[in-house]
Image: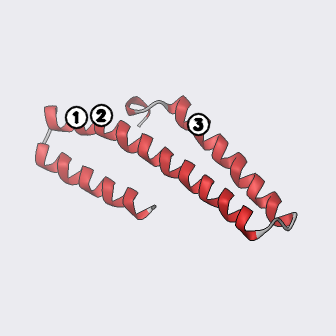
Amino acid sequence: MRQCMDAENLHRRIKKIIGQLNAIDRMVEEDVPCENLLIQINAAKGALHKVGQVVLEGHLNHCVRDGIEHGDADKTVQEFAKAIEHFSRLS
């Protein structure tokens, strides 16, 4: 996996999301208005979705390309379709 994506970028994004989740947790304790809480939840959800996009793009540019060029193209496309299906369930 590390060879097909920028792990440092992913770690940075994930740490930011963890910070957002910790802030949301504090907001619950501080009895912040529901609308403000939902805004922050949506921001964290969007950031997590972006992490998935980065992973999927890396998978496409490295693993899928390699599978098509040096392996079984039909199997590679089928596996990529499954990866997209898994990712789309997250939305």
Residue that badge 3 annotates: 11
Q: Distance from label 3 to label 2 (Cα)?
A: 19 Å
Q: What is the x, y in percent for residue 35?
A: 71, 67
> Does label 3 or label 1 sit earlier along the sequence?
3
Q: Amino acid at mark 1?
A: Arg
Residue that badge 2 annotates: 61
Residue that badge 1 annotates: 65
Contact check, label 1 and label 2, Cβ < 8 Å = yes
Q: Distance from label 3 to label 1 (Cα)?
A: 24 Å
Q: Amino acid at mark 3?
A: His
Above/below status of 40 relative to 73: below
Image quadrant of residue 66? top left
Image quadrant of residue 25? bottom right
Q: Amino acid at mark 2?
A: Asn
Q: Residue furthest right?
A: 30
| Direction from residue 13 to residue 76 in the image, left or right | left
Bin the neighbour count of mark 2 within 10 Å (Cα to Cα): few under 14, some 14-19, many 20 and up. few
Above/below status of 43 relative to 72: below
